[in-house]
Image: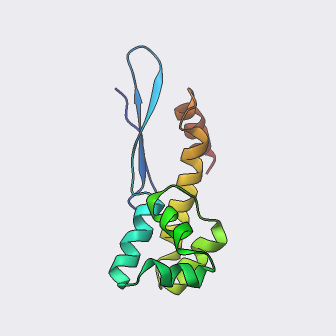
C-alpha cells in the first residue's frame, strides 16, 4: 500500500490506499464539519434552538447539520463561527473538505486527481 497524507492544520486528512489490483480506494479518517459543529456547540453549552435562531433556520434543520444529513452553506459556516467565536479558518477548511470529499468519494481516479490538484496548490 502507498499512503499519501494531506494535512491542512486541522483534524482533517485523507489517506489514499493503492490496492494490489491497481484500483484506488479513498479511505477517509476525518473530523467532519458536522462533528465539529456539535463539539463547539456543546463546549459553548448552547441548545440547538439558540444556534438555529441565530442562523435564521429552524431547529430541525440545524439538527440535520450536526448529524451530517444536510450541508451548511459557506455564509452559514461564517455566521456560526462569528456567533460562537470559533476558529473561522478551521470551520471553512472542514466545510471545503466536505465539499471536495462529496465530489470525489465515488470516483475511481480520485487519488490521482487530488494529487494533481495538491501539486497545483
**Percent from the top left, x then y, of residue 83?**
53, 86
Identify which residue is drawn at 48% across, 67% down: 63
**Percent from the top left, x then y, of residue 8?**
46, 58
25 and 50: which is toward the camera: 50
Identify which residue is drawn at 55% across, 84% down: 82
How many labels, in total? Answer: 0
Residue 47 visible in the shown view:
yes
58 and 32: which is toward the camera: 58
Residue 9 visible in the shown view:
no
**Percent from the top left, x then y, of residue 10?**
41, 62
**Percent from the top left, x then y, of residue 115?**
55, 38
Lateral position of residue 56 relative to residue 21, left or right = right
Identify which residue is drawn at 39% across, 52% down: 30
Identify which residue is drawn at 48% across, 85% down: 85
Name the image colouring: rainbow
Q: Quadrant of the N terminus?
A: top left
Whether residue 110 is situated above or below residue 6 in the rendered picture:
above
Lateral position of residue 29 relative to residue 120, left or right = left
Whether residue 117 is situated above or below residue 109 in the rendered picture:
below
Whether residue 84 is situated above or below residue 114 in the rendered picture:
below
Amino acid at each position: 500500500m502507498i499512503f499519501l497524507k494531506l494535512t491542512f492544520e486541522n483534524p482533517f486528512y485523507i489517506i489514499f490506499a493503492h490496492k494490489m489490483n491497481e484500483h484506488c480506494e479513498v479511505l477517509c479518517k476525518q473530523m467532519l464539519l458536522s462533528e465539529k459543529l456539535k463539539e463547539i456547540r456543546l463546549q459553548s453549552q448552547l441548545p440547538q434552538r439558540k444556534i438555529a435562531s441565530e442562523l435564521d433556520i429552524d431547529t430541525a434543520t440545524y439538527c440535520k447539520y450536526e448529524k451530517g444529513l444536510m450541508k451548511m452553506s459557506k455564509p452559514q459556516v461564517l455566521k456560526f463561527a462569528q456567533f460562537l467565536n470559533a476558529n473561522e479558518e478551521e470551520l471553512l477548511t472542514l466545510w471545503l473538505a466536505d465539499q471536495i470529499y462529496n465530489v470525489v468519494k465515488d470516483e475511481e481516479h480520485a487519488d490521482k486527481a487530488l494529487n494533481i490538484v495538491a501539486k497545483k496548490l
